[in-house]
């Protein structure tokens, strides 16, 4: 997931339609598979963060469609002749490692335990299990995660904790 994130360009995101087109010819997707991800219903506040970021890159930085959605940090030689950060570079990260480092730093600043980028995928899969009310809805949710087979979503992310298992089984008998 973070490899795909590192390779996304501004042209891959359509804010108005609420989608990300993961074209495997340009995005480093797992198994080089192209698919569309529609924005998951996780709250307008989170959507607004994405909208603000895209608008910042397009309107304030005047970046084009082929520029990275998540650009690398620009490194320059500073006045002290040491390397320093200097804003955003119009290049993609060469690997997902810096993205994970940014996540670690953000979690530390928020005084939260670290969660790697892939854990958000697990959270989305679990959320789908809670809010989808039919097999068709969960299949659409699974496809939105990039899975052809809904069993991939179930087997990779569908664990039910013991306490929740007990709640479910007991409620079925009520």
Image (tube, rainbow, N blue to C red):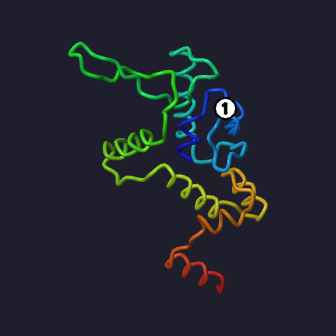
Give 74 or 138, whichever is nearer the viewer. 74
Q: Quadrant of residue 26?
A: top right
- Residue 76: percent from the left, percent from the top? 34, 18
Image check: 131 left or right of 96? right
At x 36% / y 22%, what residue is drawn? 75
Residue bearing the label numbered 1: 12
Q: Quadrant of residue 16?
A: top right
| Count of labels in the image | 1
Give 32 or 127, whichever is nearer the viewer. 32
Give 18 or 149, whichever is nearer the viewer. 149
Image check: 46 left or right of 114? right
- Residue 31: percent from the left, percent from the top? 67, 50
At x 23% / y 16%, what residue is drawn? 81
Secondary structure type for disc 1: helix
- Residue 134: percent from the left, percent from the top? 76, 64
Looking at this view, name the residue that lies furthest to the right.
Answer: 136
At x 60% / y 68%, what residue is drawn? 158
Crowd around label 1: few <14 · some 14–19 · many ≥20 (10 Å): many
Q: Is residue 118 above or below residue 18?
A: below
Q: Quadrant of the C terminus?
A: bottom right
């Amino acid at each position: 997931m973070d490899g795909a994130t590192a390779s996304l360009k501004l042209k891959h995101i359509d804010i108005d339609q609420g989608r990300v087109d993961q074209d495997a010819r340009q995005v480093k997707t797992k198994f080089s598979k192209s698919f569309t991800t529609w924005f998951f219903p996780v709250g307008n506040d989170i959507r607004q963060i994405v909208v603000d970021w895209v608008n910042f890159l397009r309107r304030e930085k005047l970046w084009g469609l082929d520029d990275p959605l998540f650009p690398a940090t620009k490194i320059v030689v500073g006045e002290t002749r040491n390397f320093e950060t200097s804003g955003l570079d119009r290049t993609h990260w060469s690997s997902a490692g810096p993205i994970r480092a940014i996540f670690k730093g953000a979690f530390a600043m928020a005084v939260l335990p670290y969660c790697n980028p892939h854990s958000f995928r697990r959270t989305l899969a679990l959320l789908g299990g809670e809010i989808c009310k039919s097999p068709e809805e969960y299949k659409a949710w699974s496809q939105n995660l990039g899975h052809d087979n809904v069993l991939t979503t179930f087997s990779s992310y569908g664990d039910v904790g013991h306490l929740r298992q007990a709640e479910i089984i007991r409620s079925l008998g009520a």
